[in-house]
Amino acid sequence: MKVELSHIQKRFGKVHANNDITLTVPAGTIQGILGENGAGKSTLMKILSGFYSADEGTILLDDKPVKITSPADAVAQGIGMLHQDPLDFPPMRVIDNFLIGRKNASFFPDRKRALAALHDLQQQFDFAIDPETYVDSLTVGERQQLEILRLLWLGARVLILDEPTTGISAIQKEKLFATLKKLVEQGMTVLFVSHKLEEVEGLCGRVAVMQRGRLVGETRPPYLTAELVQMMFGKVVQPDARVNAGTPEIALKISNLEIEDFRLQIRDVSVELHRGEVIGLAGMEGSGQRQFLRTLGGLTRPVGGEIRLEEKNLAGKPYKNFMNSGIAYMPAARLEEGLIPGLSLTEHFTLCEEQSGFFVDKSKAHALTSGRIQDYTIRGVPESRIEALSGGNQQRALLALLRTPLHLLLMEHPTRGLDIESTIWIWAKLKERCKQGTSIVFISSDLDEVIRYSDRILVFFGGRVSQPVNSAATNAEQLGQLIGGKGW
Amino acid sequence: MLKKNSPWLGLGFRLLAVVLALAFTTLILVLTGAQPFDAYTNIISGSLGSVEKISDTLVAWVPLLLATSGLLVTFTAGLWNIGVEGQITLGAIFTTFVLRSLGDSGLPPALIIALAIVAGALGGALWAAVVGWLKIYGGVSEIFGGLGLNFVATAFTLFLIFGPWKRPGVASMSGTAPFPPELWLPMVGNLRLSLWSLGLAVLGIIVIYLVLNGTYFGLRLKAVGKNGRAAFLMGIPTARYLMSSFLICGAFAGLTGAMQVTAVYHNLIPSISSGYGFLGVMVGMLVNFQAAWAAPVSFFFAALNIGSIQLPIVLHLDSTLSGVLQGALVLFVLIVDGVRRRLTEKS
C-alpha cells in the first residue's frame, strides 16, 4: 500500500513536534525514518497509526485521502504499529494475545482457526512461539514477533516499527530484518523508525531524516554516513577517545557466586573488580546478565558464594546494606523502577539526599535541585514533574540523583533509547565518576557501546559467564561469537 | 487557549462541579414533586440557623474530620483504606472497654477518659494493622481485607451489646448502659458540643497537614504511594511506610470512635461509626487528597448531614437528600476533572 503524508502539523503546547511534514512511501519499500531523540519520529508514526490526530494535514492511502480516528481504525484500514515497548498482555497466553483486537469476532472466539492461522504465519517466517505459553515468559524479541503476526493476521499492509531493535538480541534482530525483507517482497510497506545509522543503512531502501520536528532530507542508497549524521544533528558528532580510569586497587571481590532462578543457573563466578573500572556485561537478553547485576545490587539473593566489599561479605544481606555500602542500582525501566511519576525534580532530589531533621528545608532543596539541573544540563525546572521530561532528560535526572561517593554503580542499559549526543554526554559523566573512584558494571545490548566504554567485558551465554575479556584486545566479531555460544 | 495547572482554572472547574451537582439534586427534587428552594433553605437553616444548629454541625464535623485526616495518610501511600469503618468501631469498643473496666476503680475520671481515648486509638490502629499485615505480607488487597474486617467489627459490636456488655435486664439495640456523666468529655453549656473533641480534630488535621506537606516522612510516603518499586530502589523501606500509614490512619479512626463514645453517645451503640468513615473516603476524593481542603469540605458535608435532618420534619422529604447531594458532588467533581484534563491536554 502506498502511504502519503501531506503537510502534517502537530503541536504539544509550546512544542512543535511535527512541522509541515510531507512524505511519500511507495508500496513494497522499507522506509527508514531517522532522527535523534525528540526529533518527532514517534509523533509522526503515532499520527499515522491513529494514536494522535494531526492538527493539520492529510493522510492518503493508495491516493485516497483517509481519516484515521483510532488505532483500531488504523488497523481496519491496514496500518499496524509495533511500539517501542510491546503493547501486549503479559499475564495472558500467546494465543489469547493473538486473538485480541479481532474485529467482528463472534462472541466465542474461534480458537481452532486462530491456532491454525498462527501456525501458518509462524511457518512462513520461521518463528517458533508456543501458542499456549504465557507472554510474560517470552523475550522482547518474541513478543515483537507475536505482535507482527497478530497485525498481519488482522490484515495490516503497512507496518510501522518504532525503534524495534532496542532490547532484542543480535540473532533476533537478524530474524526481524529477514522478516521485514520478506514482507516488502510481498508488497507490504514498512516504516522503520530508528536512530541507529547502521541498521537504517543496512535495511532501508529509502531514508527520511527528521530534525527538531522537520523533515530535513530524503536519500537513497548508497548512503554516506557522514551525510546522514550531518542531517540528523546539523553538525558532526565524534565520540570521545577511550578513557581508562581503572586502578590496580580491588573494589569488589566476587568469589564462587551462584545464582539460581526458575529459568537459569549461574555457577561459580569469581571476578575481581578494580576501583574506577568499567565492566560491560554482554550477551543475548536472558542469558543471565540481569540476574548477575541484580545480585551485585542486593536485589536478588545468591544461593552461594561471596560478594566482598572492603572485607565485608554482602552476599545474602538485604538491599539496604548494599545501598549503605555505596552500591547503587540504576534500572532500565526509568518511569517504572527508577523515577516516581507525579513527583517533581525537587522532590526526587530531596528523597535521595541524606535526611537532615524532621522537616524538609524547601528553599535548600530548591537550591540543590537548581544546581543539579545546571550540572547535568537537564531541560526542566525544579518544579517539573519527572514524567513531563523527555527520556534523555529523565536519564540525566537519574544520574544526577546518584549519591556521592559511590563505590559501585550498576546499570541496566544506561543509554537505551538515547541518541548519540546524549549517549556521549552520559558516558562522559560516568567516566568522571570513575576518576573519583567509582567502579561501574553495566548491561547493554549495544555491542559497540560495550566495547567502547568498558575496560573489561564479561560475556554471558545461557547462564555461563566468560573470563573477563580485555576490551582493548577484542572486537565485535570475537564477542559476537562468544555471545552466540561459540568458542567457550 | 487553556493553560495547564493554573490554580484559578482548577477552582473554576471545581465550582462548575458544585453547580452541576446542585442542578442534578434540584432535578431529583423537582422529579419527586418537592420545592427545591425550600429544601435548600431548610438545609441551611437546619445546619447554621442557630447556635444549637451550628453546635450540632460541629459535633458531626469532629468525627468526619478525624476520619478524613487519617484517610489522607493512607491515600497518600496509595491505599484505599475502606476498612476505616471497622477501625472506628474497634476504637469505640476499646474505649468502652476501658471506661467499663476502670469506671469503678476510683481513679480520677479525667485520667480514665484519657486512658480510654488512648485505648481507642490503639484499637483502631490494631484493626488497621491487621489490614496492613494482610496487604503487605499476604498480598490481600486492602480494599477486600478492610471490607471483610468491617463486617467482623460490626458483628463483634453486636455480640458485645447483646452478650457480655448487655444492659442490666434486657439487651437492646440502643446499646450498652450509658456511662455516668463524670466519664463524659465536658460539654459547652447545655450544647452537645465538647471543645475537647473539637480541639482534637482541629489539632489532628493541622498535624496531618504538616506531616504530609513538610516532612521527609510525608514525602517518602508520597513516593511509596506513587511508585513503590522506585521508592524501594531509592532506599525507602516501603513495607514499613505502608504499615505506618495504616497505623496512623487506624489511630485516627480509633480516635473517631473514642470521641463518639466519650463525647456524643456516652455508650456503645450498634452503628457507632455512623458511616463517617465512608463519608471521609468521599471527602478525601473530593479534595483530591489535599489536606488543606479537608477541613472546609468536611465541614460542608457535616452541615449537609445535619441540615437535611430538617427535611422529613418540615417538608416530609427523606433525609437521605444530603447523601444524594454529597454523592452527586463527588461524581461531578471527578467527571469535571476528567473533562478538564481532556481539554487542557488537547490544547
Image (cartoon, coloured by chain):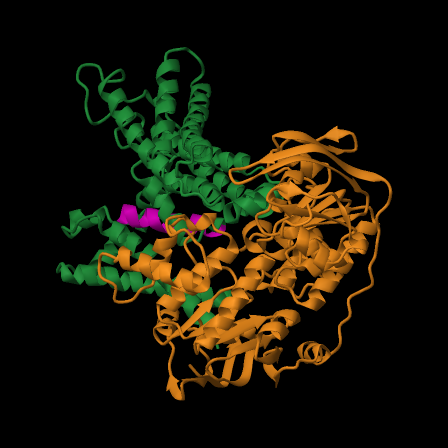
Q: Indicate the position of residue B151 as horizontal and vertical percent values.
A: 28, 32
Q: Indicate the position of residue A221 as horizontal and vertical percent values.
A: 63, 82
Q: Nearer the viewer, residue B287 or A75?
A: A75
Q: Residue furthest top?
A: B105
Q: Quadrant of residue B93?
A: top left
Q: Quadrant of residue B20?
A: bottom left
Confirm whether the magenta stretch covers residue B293.
yes
- Report the side of A326 relative to B321 (left or right): right
Residue drawn 61% across the image and 35% down it: A259
Q: Nearer the viewer, residue A72 or A473?
A: A473
Q: Which chain is orange?
A: A
Q: Indicate the position of residue B52 as horizontal and vertical percent values.
A: 31, 42
Residue drawn 15% across the image and 62% down it: B31
Q: Quadrant of the N terminus of chain A?
A: bottom left
Q: Colour of chain B?
A: green
Q: Nearer the viewer, residue A218 or B325?
A: A218
Examine the rendered structure and indicate whether residue A155 appears above or below residue B274. Answer: below
Residue drawn 53% across the image and 44% down it: B228
- Report the side of A43 relative to B34 (left or right): right
Could you tell me what secondary structure mostly forms the magenta stretch?
A: helix
Residue A488 visible (yes or no): yes
Q: Residue furthest bottom?
A: A63
Examine the rendered structure and indicate whether residue B189 appears above or below residue A402. Answer: above
Q: Quadrant of residue A329?
A: top right
Residue A371 visible (yes or no): no
Q: Nearer the viewer, residue A263 or A426?
A: A263
Q: How many marks?
A: 0
Part of the protein shown in magenta: B292-307
Q: Quadrant of the C terminus of chain A?
A: top right
- Report the side of A192 relative to A244 (left or right): left
